[in-house]
Protein backbone atom coordinates (compact mmCIF):
# COMPACT_ATOMS: atom_id res chain seq x y z
CA UNK A 1 0.00 0.00 0.00
CA UNK A 2 1.27 3.45 -0.72
CA UNK A 3 1.09 6.71 1.11
CA UNK A 4 1.59 9.92 -0.83
CA UNK A 5 3.65 12.67 0.78
CA UNK A 6 5.27 15.96 -0.15
CA UNK A 7 8.97 16.76 -0.17
CA UNK A 8 11.05 19.66 -1.47
CA UNK A 9 11.20 18.22 -5.00
CA UNK A 10 7.51 17.42 -5.41
CA UNK A 11 5.73 14.38 -4.00
CA UNK A 12 6.61 10.75 -3.41
CA UNK A 13 5.23 7.45 -2.13
CA UNK A 14 5.95 5.26 0.88
CA UNK A 15 5.28 1.75 -0.40
CA UNK A 16 4.76 -1.77 0.89
CA UNK A 17 6.88 -4.76 -0.15
CA UNK A 18 4.46 -6.02 -2.80
CA UNK A 19 4.62 -2.60 -4.49
CA UNK A 20 8.40 -2.60 -4.26
CA UNK A 21 8.49 -5.92 -6.10
CA UNK A 22 6.16 -4.67 -8.84
CA UNK A 23 8.17 -1.47 -9.27
CA UNK A 24 11.48 -3.34 -9.37
CA UNK A 25 10.14 -5.89 -11.86
CA UNK A 26 8.73 -3.10 -14.03
CA UNK A 27 11.99 -1.18 -13.90
CA UNK A 28 14.16 -4.20 -14.71
CA UNK A 29 11.95 -4.97 -17.68
CA UNK A 30 12.88 -1.67 -19.38
CA UNK A 31 16.29 -1.08 -17.78
CA UNK A 32 18.27 -1.72 -20.95
CA UNK A 33 16.05 0.60 -22.99
CA UNK A 34 16.73 3.69 -20.86
CA UNK A 35 18.97 6.08 -22.84
CA UNK A 36 22.43 6.41 -21.34
CA UNK A 37 22.16 10.21 -21.24
CA UNK A 38 19.17 10.14 -18.88
CA UNK A 39 20.39 11.28 -15.39
CA UNK A 40 17.22 10.07 -13.65
CA UNK A 41 18.35 6.46 -14.04
CA UNK A 42 21.30 6.90 -11.70
CA UNK A 43 19.30 9.13 -9.36
CA UNK A 44 16.51 6.56 -9.10
CA UNK A 45 18.88 3.70 -8.35
CA UNK A 46 20.72 5.75 -5.73
CA UNK A 47 17.60 6.90 -3.89
CA UNK A 48 15.63 3.68 -4.23
CA UNK A 49 18.20 0.89 -3.94
CA UNK A 50 21.05 2.53 -2.03
CA UNK A 51 19.44 5.10 0.27
CA UNK A 52 16.01 3.53 0.73
CA UNK A 53 13.98 6.67 0.13
CA UNK A 54 10.31 6.82 -0.75
CA UNK A 55 9.54 6.58 -4.45
CA UNK A 56 9.48 10.04 -6.03
CA UNK A 57 6.60 10.50 -8.48
CA UNK A 58 9.00 11.85 -11.10
CA UNK A 59 10.83 8.51 -11.15
CA UNK A 60 7.60 6.56 -11.60
CA UNK A 61 6.69 8.90 -14.47
CA UNK A 62 10.13 8.43 -16.07
CA UNK A 63 9.89 4.64 -15.81
CA UNK A 64 6.39 4.69 -17.28
CA UNK A 65 7.53 6.90 -20.16
CA UNK A 66 9.98 4.18 -21.19
CA UNK A 67 7.39 1.45 -20.65
CA UNK A 68 4.97 3.30 -22.95
CA UNK A 69 7.62 3.51 -25.66
CA UNK A 70 8.11 -0.22 -25.28
CA UNK A 71 4.32 -0.71 -25.45
CA UNK A 72 4.23 -2.15 -21.93
CA UNK A 73 1.62 -1.65 -19.23
CA UNK A 74 2.37 1.35 -17.03
CA UNK A 75 2.99 1.06 -13.29
CA UNK A 76 0.16 2.49 -11.19
CA UNK A 77 0.68 3.30 -7.51
CA UNK A 78 -2.56 3.62 -5.57
CA UNK A 79 -3.13 5.51 -2.34
CA UNK A 80 -3.85 2.98 0.40
CA UNK A 81 -3.30 2.48 4.09
CA UNK A 82 0.17 1.73 5.45
CA UNK A 83 1.26 -1.34 7.38
CA UNK A 84 4.33 -1.62 9.58
CA UNK A 85 6.84 -1.91 6.73
CA UNK A 86 5.48 1.05 4.79
CA UNK A 87 5.43 3.22 7.93
CA UNK A 88 8.94 2.26 9.00
CA UNK A 89 11.48 5.12 8.82
CA UNK A 90 14.36 2.60 8.65
CA UNK A 91 15.78 3.27 5.18
CA UNK A 92 18.59 0.75 5.68
CA UNK A 93 16.10 -2.11 5.97
CA UNK A 94 14.22 -0.91 2.91
CA UNK A 95 17.30 -0.48 0.71
CA UNK A 96 18.53 -3.93 1.74
CA UNK A 97 15.15 -5.50 1.01
CA UNK A 98 14.95 -3.83 -2.41
CA UNK A 99 18.41 -4.99 -3.45
CA UNK A 100 17.54 -8.50 -2.30
CA UNK A 101 14.31 -8.51 -4.36
CA UNK A 102 16.23 -7.24 -7.38
CA UNK A 103 18.81 -10.03 -7.10
CA UNK A 104 16.14 -12.69 -6.58
CA UNK A 105 14.14 -11.58 -9.62
CA UNK A 106 17.32 -11.47 -11.72
CA UNK A 107 18.28 -15.02 -10.70
CA UNK A 108 14.76 -16.46 -10.89
CA UNK A 109 13.48 -18.54 -13.77
CA UNK A 110 10.90 -16.99 -16.08
CA UNK A 111 8.11 -19.00 -14.42
CA UNK A 112 9.24 -18.18 -10.88
CA UNK A 113 9.59 -14.51 -11.70
CA UNK A 114 6.10 -14.39 -13.21
CA UNK A 115 4.67 -16.25 -10.22
CA UNK A 116 6.09 -13.68 -7.82
CA UNK A 117 4.83 -10.77 -9.92
CA UNK A 118 1.31 -12.21 -10.08
CA UNK A 119 1.37 -12.85 -6.34
CA UNK A 120 2.43 -9.25 -5.68
CA UNK A 121 -0.38 -7.98 -7.92
CA UNK A 122 -2.95 -9.98 -5.95
CA UNK A 123 -1.52 -8.72 -2.67
CA UNK A 124 -1.55 -5.12 -3.89
CA UNK A 125 -5.19 -5.37 -4.96
CA UNK A 126 -6.14 -6.54 -1.46
CA UNK A 127 -4.70 -3.45 0.21
CA UNK A 128 -7.39 -1.34 1.93
CA UNK A 129 -8.13 2.27 0.98
CA UNK A 130 -6.49 5.05 2.99
CA UNK A 131 -8.14 6.47 6.10
CA UNK A 132 -7.45 9.87 4.56
CA UNK A 133 -6.07 10.60 1.08
CA UNK A 134 -3.18 12.97 0.43
CA UNK A 135 -5.54 15.70 -0.77
CA UNK A 136 -7.90 15.15 2.14
CA UNK A 137 -4.99 15.39 4.57
CA UNK A 138 -3.82 18.64 2.95
CA UNK A 139 -7.32 20.10 3.22
CA UNK A 140 -7.61 18.99 6.86
CA UNK A 141 -4.20 20.47 7.69
CA UNK A 142 -5.16 23.75 6.03
CA UNK A 143 -8.38 23.87 8.05
CA UNK A 144 -6.43 23.26 11.26
CA UNK A 145 -4.00 26.05 10.45
CA UNK A 146 -6.82 28.46 9.60
CA UNK A 147 -8.62 27.59 12.82
CA UNK A 148 -5.46 28.16 14.85
CA UNK A 149 -4.85 31.49 13.10
CA UNK A 150 -8.44 32.59 13.74
CA UNK A 151 -8.10 31.62 17.40
CA UNK A 152 -4.80 33.48 17.72
CA UNK A 153 -6.11 36.74 16.19
CA UNK A 154 -8.73 37.45 18.93
CA UNK A 155 -6.13 36.77 21.62
CA UNK A 156 -3.73 39.23 20.01
CA UNK A 157 -6.45 41.89 19.72
CA UNK A 158 -7.36 41.40 23.37
CA UNK A 159 -3.74 41.67 24.51
CA UNK A 160 -3.16 44.85 22.51
CA UNK A 161 -6.34 46.53 23.76
CA UNK A 162 -5.93 45.49 27.39
CA UNK A 163 -2.33 46.48 27.96
CA UNK A 164 -1.49 50.05 28.91
CA UNK A 165 2.26 49.56 28.53
CA UNK A 166 3.74 50.93 25.26
CA UNK A 167 6.71 48.55 25.59
CA UNK A 168 4.44 45.51 25.84
CA UNK A 169 2.46 46.69 22.82
CA UNK A 170 5.66 47.12 20.84
CA UNK A 171 6.82 43.63 21.83
CA UNK A 172 3.52 42.09 20.75
CA UNK A 173 3.57 43.90 17.40
CA UNK A 174 7.20 43.00 16.69
CA UNK A 175 6.34 39.30 17.04
CA UNK A 176 3.56 39.41 14.45
CA UNK A 177 3.92 38.31 10.84
CA UNK A 178 2.89 40.70 8.07
CA UNK A 179 -0.42 38.87 7.58
CA UNK A 180 -1.15 38.69 11.30
CA UNK A 181 -0.51 42.42 11.75
CA UNK A 182 -2.98 43.26 8.96
CA UNK A 183 -5.59 40.87 10.29
CA UNK A 184 -5.34 42.32 13.78
CA UNK A 185 -5.32 45.92 12.43
CA UNK A 186 -8.74 45.31 10.85
CA UNK A 187 -10.15 44.63 14.31
CA UNK A 188 -8.52 47.57 16.13
CA UNK A 189 -10.41 50.85 16.59
CA UNK A 190 -7.47 52.84 18.00
CA UNK A 191 -6.09 54.63 14.91
CA UNK A 192 -2.58 55.08 16.35
CA UNK A 193 -2.32 51.40 17.20
CA UNK A 194 -3.81 50.45 13.84
CA UNK A 195 -1.20 52.55 12.03
CA UNK A 196 1.56 50.90 14.07
CA UNK A 197 0.30 47.47 13.00
CA UNK A 198 0.11 48.49 9.33
CA UNK A 199 3.61 49.98 9.51
CA UNK A 200 4.92 46.73 10.99
CA UNK A 201 3.18 44.70 8.28
CA UNK A 202 4.71 46.87 5.56
CA UNK A 203 8.17 46.56 7.12
CA UNK A 204 7.84 42.76 7.32
CA UNK A 205 6.83 42.60 3.65
CA UNK A 206 9.74 44.79 2.53
CA UNK A 207 12.18 42.80 4.67
CA UNK A 208 10.95 39.53 3.16
CA UNK A 209 11.31 40.97 -0.35
CA UNK A 210 14.91 42.05 0.33
CA UNK A 211 15.71 38.60 1.72
CA UNK A 212 14.42 36.90 -1.47
CA UNK A 213 16.41 39.29 -3.68
Image: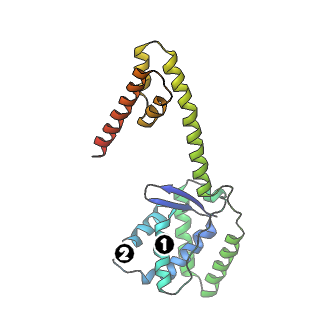
**How many numbered discs?**
2
Answer left or right for 201 relative to 140: left
Spot occupied by residue 134 in the image (x, y as percentages of width and height) = 59, 57
Residue 210 left/right relative to 65: left
Please tell me whether residue 102 is drawn above or below residue 188 in the rendered image: below
Q: Residue at x 52, y 16 (%)?
A: 162
Label 2: element kind: loop
Nearer to me, 122 or 163: 163
The 10 Å Cα crowd at callout 1, few under 14, some 14 to 19, many 20 or more, is some
Task: Out of 2 and 11, give the one closest to the viewer.
Answer: 11
Q: Nearer the viewer, residue 207 or 154?
A: 154
Task: State the image coordinates of residue 117 (x, y, percent, origin top left).
Answer: 63, 78
At 58% from the left and 47% from the top, the residue drawn is 141
Q: Where is mark 2, residue-wise?
A: 38
Q: Residue pushed farthest top?
A: 164
Is residue 76 visible to us here?
yes
Disc 1 designates what residue?
Answer: 61
Instruction: Please tell me whether residue 101 is drawn above or below residue 53 in the rendered image.
Output: below
Comparing 157 with 141, the one in front is 157
Q: Residue at x 57, y 52 (%)?
A: 138
Numbered label attached to residue 131: none
Q: Quadrant of residue 14?
A: bottom right
Dot 1 or dot 2, earlier in sequence: 2
Using the rendered view, name the quadrant where residue 20 is placed. bottom right
Amino acid sequence: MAQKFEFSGGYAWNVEQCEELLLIAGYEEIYRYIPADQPWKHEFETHFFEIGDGVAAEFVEAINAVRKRCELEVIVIRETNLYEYGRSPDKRIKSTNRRRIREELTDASVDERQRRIEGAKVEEQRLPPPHRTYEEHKAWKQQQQEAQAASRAPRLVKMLTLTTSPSIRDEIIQNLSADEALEVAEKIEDTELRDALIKHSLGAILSDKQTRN
